[in-house]
Image (cartoon, rainbow, N blue to C red):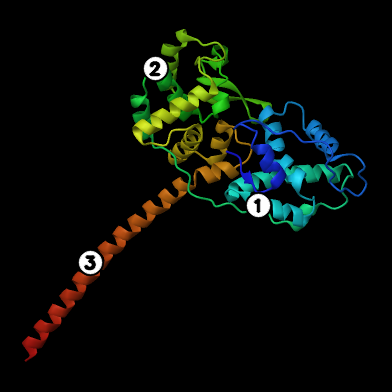
Amino acid sequence: MPCLLLARNFLNSLGNLRYGEVPELADGHDLGLPNGNSSVKQHFNQFLKSRRQGIAPGTVAYYKQCLIPFIEDFELTPDGINEFLANLRCNTGGKLAYFRAIRAFCNWLVRNDYLKDNPLKKVDPPKPARPILPSLTTDQVSYLIEQAENLREKAIISLFADSGIRLNELASIMEGDIDWTNHTVIIWGKGNKQRRAPFTERTVKLLKEWLPHDGYDNIWGMTRKGIQDMLHRLEQRTGLKCNAHTFRRTFASNLHRAGMDIEHIMRLGGWESLDMVIRYTRSVKFEDSLKLYRNLETQWAVGHRGLLRRGLAVGKHREDDTCYIS
């Protein structure tokens, strides 16, 4: 659910919106730009049209969802941006998403000479918490596959865990996208980029058993929402985290546990930088460090017991010497 904004006009408009709907910008708003006689709607629409070709509809919806409530009730100044962010009733991660949308809009305004100075220079970005994100072990993945209700669900779980693909990517796979020889599937990823994702012999077997049941829009015969609902039911039944993001982290973490370099993981998973891979494998790094710590702890305990035994032996020897001398 998007952040709720404590602003009069936008709250009124939200009252008539259902979840998932995107608000539209009303006419007559003025950004107060130095050289601007045109309305903010004109600038905003120009900004949306300036986004690169092939941008996903969800990205356009994201800009609208984040920018319209800001534009309608706040000034494009450092104080206005800070007030807007402070009035968002959501966690810091949610506020950072709004901040990034405002940053993209401000950068565009400056680049096109609608603004001389970027107000975000005087605004600190929200700093979200960085918790250790959950991932599954190979045994837990096997358990989820066992607990899946039918062949289709087993194939979906197996492919998610093997490839680390995103939900939208999995939901768009057609039979012709599968390369049976190399055990890869062609998918369209974020930013409308095509790539190949790998999978194992386990997934090959499940896919070949399922494929005669070919669907209409994809090989699953399920919508994106249907896949999400299936994963949620499996999570409720097993008590294990079961969503596309968890499987993506699982893909990265299990490869890293097996000793694969993070640059190879980045390429196999379709990440453009190492940042997310490093974040996803943080738990593995900690596990490795904890194992080393436990090994040292054992060595320390053994060493301590050895010192203690030697100390007692020395003490006994001294007692014997004393008795002998006396």
Q: Nearer the viewer, residue 25 or 59?
A: 25
Quarter that holds the N terminus: top right
Q: Secondary structure at mark 2?
A: helix
* Label 2 or label 3, whichever comes before in sequence order: 2
- Across and down, in percent, residue 210 comes to 43, 13
- Amino acid type, mark 1: Asn
C-alpha gap between disc 2 and disc 3? 56 Å
Marker disc for residue 96: none
Q: Secondary structure at mark 3?
A: helix
- Across and down, in percent, residue 236 comes to 38, 33
- Amino acid type, mark 2: Leu
Would you name the residue on which mark 3 appears?
305
Marker disc for residue 151: 2
* Label 1 or label 2, whichever comes before in sequence order: 1
Marker disc for residue 87: 1
- Residue 161: which quarter of the image? top left
